[in-house]
Image (cartoon, rainbow, N blue to C red):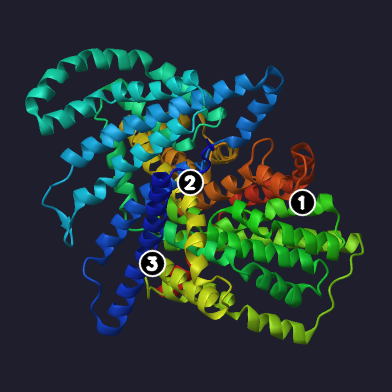
């Protein structure tokens, strides 16, 4: 009998359904606000209930995307530390790592199934059955939450190491997660059968006692699991769940806070700009921009370095993921700088690893959008605030390139007017994109979400219809490449918002503010401690979950010391950028090690000089607020 290989037909069918659903949702998410803004401009009448459809489509793509992220094993985690754990256990045989993976599977199954029950309870009892978006009940949209968590939980179980003992251990997570979620199950039973709910509710007293006793040991296991590679959303969601269970709080608060965040007005910009960025990265836009900047500035001393800085910044600002820039352009830029430009490999790999995150300070940075949404700071002003610090980083990195080039006597690329003209014509479509964003959003012609939708449509026209570098048959697969990032980020934001709510409800920011106010008198000392704390946070936590969890804690402290909200936001993001290249576990270090095929220890040495330079820039941004606030003040004065 032949051994069956590959997924079963039903598995292939379900995967196909997921893929088509994700592409259709993202297409609708782009087209609805685009058509709405077009209709308002031309006919002064928009798409009926457009905004409501858009935010609920974000809810759908968050959990459809999260399911695909689980399928592809792409959930964001501290995989860098997991690699170190794997190396540490390498001499103890394969079984040691199998049980580490089994433990992470148990934790993932446990937390995810607990979230299944609480989100199902919220869907049943938390929404008015008669409330609708157009003709679709809101409950129908909300039902994607328990379904999405269920799909993720089953996949975590199936991905556990093979073997009866390991699968049973991972499967025990279903039982433990269900027991933790007992209050939510009681609420579901009350809604369906009050008598059954009343019977089961007699166990709630024992549940509270057990939850109170086990909460903090289980939280300790989650923290250990984070080091071993447990997805960040599982760790944050699990900590929130256990804290609420320990206090006897309503467990439905966690999915409810996630729902509230995902259906907010600015969050749709996150998946839209991500799709636009991936369409750019999957076309030859990067190559055209490299050719353009090489032709325009390559004749300067260090011109190739300046070109590399500019194109990396451009792409990262749209993808929102510095790792994408390293993976997409790293090889090509390395070839240009080392093989064509004769720069040393050590210098080149260190600098390219650093370049990847500079774009996070420029519009339409997803980090700025998320920070503004969480901190309730005007996103328009945050965009303005990031421009001068971003330009400072670009300028200093360019100066380093110039100095190194002059010292090493590296000859610039001769200027050729014909080549410059051709490169401008070829990359004209990409050059118009930031101009369109600036004119449409910064003049108030379109909202942030409409600007993001316009970006997707515009990039589609340029890369698919004009340049034809992405074929129609390949459009779906290209969009699907963005889905694991979209789903991974949005599910983190959803569960992290529940943890943030717990901190606020427990008055953690107020108590932290009292302690800081008592023990720290100097604004200078506060900012120094803040720099250090954010640097450590950036090493171990992705920027999106850090914004949700950490920002609510530091915002009151910033007010206490008179730090402007916009300035505090730029300090936060600049520090997180630095965390990406901070040894030993900065995310970009591992991506660069993979892309350039060099050992981590050697890459640490290559990056360290640039880490010191960027640390100096971050300190300048922190202690000279006028760099951040100058452009905002100028715009405000011009509008008066």
For the residues labelled 1 and 3, say whether their Cβ atoms are less than 8 Å apart. no
Is residue 599 positioned above or below 458 on the image?
above
In this rendered view, identify the residue nearer to me: 596 or 7. 7
Measure the alpha-carbon separation of dots 1 and 2: 26 Å
* x 36%, y 56%: residue: 21
Q: Which residue is mark 2?
A: 544
Measure the alpha-carbon separation of dots 2 and 3: 22 Å
Q: Mark 1 or mark 2: which comes first in sequence?
A: 1
Rate crowding at label 2 as few (under 14), some (14 to 19) or many (20 or more) other CA atoms within 10 Å.
some
Rate crowding at label 3 as few (under 14), some (14 to 19) or many (20 or more) other CA atoms within 10 Å.
many
Residue 536 appears in the rendering: no
Measure the alpha-carbon separation of dots 1 and 3: 37 Å
- Tell me residue 185's x, y (percent): 21, 28
Residue farthest along the front direction in this orientation = 1
Q: Which residue is mark 1?
A: 349
* x 55%, y 70%: residue: 470
Q: Secondary structure at mark 2?
A: helix
Q: Which mark is residue 375?
A: none
Is residue 524 positioned above or below 596 on the image?
above
Q: Mark 2 or mark 3: which comes first in sequence?
A: 3
> From the viewer's perspective, is 64 left or right of 45?
right
In this rendered view, identify the residue nearer to me: 184 or 584. 184
């Amino acid at each position: 009998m032949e051994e069956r290989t590959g997924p079963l037909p039903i598995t292939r069918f379900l995967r196909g359904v997921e893929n088509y659903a994700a592409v259709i949702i993202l297409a609708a998410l782009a087209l609805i606000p685009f058509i709405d803004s077009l209709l308002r401009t031309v006919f002064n009448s928009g798409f009926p209930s457009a905004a409501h459809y858009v935010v609920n489509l974000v809810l759908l793509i968050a959990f459809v995307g999260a399911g695909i992220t689980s399928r592809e094993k792409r959930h964001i985690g501290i995989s860098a530390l997991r690699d170190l754990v794997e190396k540490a256990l390498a001499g103890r045989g394969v079984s040691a790592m199998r049980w580490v993976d089994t433990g992470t599977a148990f934790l993932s199954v446990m937390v995810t199934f607990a979230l299944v029950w609480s989100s199902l309870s919220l869907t049943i009892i938390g929404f008015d059955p008669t409330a609708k978006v157009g003709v679709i009940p809101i409950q129908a949209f909300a039902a994607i939450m328990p379904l999405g968590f269920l799909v993720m939980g089953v996949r975590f179980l199936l991905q556990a190491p093979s073997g009866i003992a390991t699968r049973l251990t991972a499967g025990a997570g279903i039982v433990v997660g269900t027991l933790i979620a007992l209050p939510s199950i009681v609420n579901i039973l009350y809604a369906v059968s009050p008598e059954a709910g009343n019977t089961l509710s007699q166990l709630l007293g024992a549940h509270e006692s057990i939850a109170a006793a086990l909460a903090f040991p289980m939280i300790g296991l989650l923290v250990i699991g984070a080091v071993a590679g447990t997805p960040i959303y599982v760790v944050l969601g699990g900590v929130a769940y256990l804290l609420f269970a320990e206090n006897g709080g309503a467990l439905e608060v966690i999915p409810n806070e996630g729902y509230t965040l995902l259906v907010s007005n600015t969050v749709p910009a996150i998946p839209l700009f991500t799709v636009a960025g991936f369409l750019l990265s999957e076309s030859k836009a990067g190559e055209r921009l490299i050719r353009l900047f090489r032709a325009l500035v390559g004749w300067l001393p260090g011109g190739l370095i300046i070109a590399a800085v500019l194109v990396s910044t451009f792409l990262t600002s749209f993808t929102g993921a510095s790792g994408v820039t390293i993976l997409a352009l790293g090889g090509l830029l390395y070839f240009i700088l080392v093989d064509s430009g004769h720069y040393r490999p050590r210098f080149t790999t260190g600098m390219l690893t650093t370049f990847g995150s500079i774009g996070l300070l420029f519009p339409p940075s997803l980090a700025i959008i998320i920070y503004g949404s969480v901190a309730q700071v005007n996103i328009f002003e945050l965009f303005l605030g990031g421009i001068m610090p971003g330009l400072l980083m670009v300028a200093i990195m360019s100066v380093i390139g110039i100095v190194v080039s002059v010292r090493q006597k590296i000859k610039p690329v001769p200027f050729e007017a014909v080549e410059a003209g051709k490169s401008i014509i070829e990359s004209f479509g990409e050059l118009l994109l930031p101009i369109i964003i600036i004119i449409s959003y910064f003049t108030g012609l379109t909202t942030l979400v409409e600007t993001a939708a316009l970006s997707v449509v515009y990039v589609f026209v340029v890369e698919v219809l004009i340049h034809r570098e992405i074929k129609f048959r390949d459009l779906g697969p290209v969009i699907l490449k963005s889905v694991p990032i979209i789903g991974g980020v949005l599910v983190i934001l959803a569960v992290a918002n529940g943890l943030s709510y717990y901190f606020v409800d427990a008055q953690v920011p107020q108590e932290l503010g009292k302690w800081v106010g008592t023990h720290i008198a100097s604004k200078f000392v506060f900012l120094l401690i803040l720099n250090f704390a954010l640097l450590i946070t950036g090493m171990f936590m992705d920027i999106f979950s850090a914004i949700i969890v950490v920002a609510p804690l530091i915002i009151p402290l910033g007010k206490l010391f008179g730090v402007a909200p916009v300035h505090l936001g730029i300090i936060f993001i600049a520090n997180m950028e630095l965390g990406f290249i901070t040894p030993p576990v900065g995310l970009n270090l591992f991506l660069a090690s993979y892309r350039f095929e060099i050992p981590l220890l050697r890459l640490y040495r290559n990056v360290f000089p640039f880490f010191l330079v960027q640390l100096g820039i971050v300190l300048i941004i922190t202690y000279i607020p006028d760099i951040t606030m100058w452009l905002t003040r100028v715009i405000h004065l011009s509008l008066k």
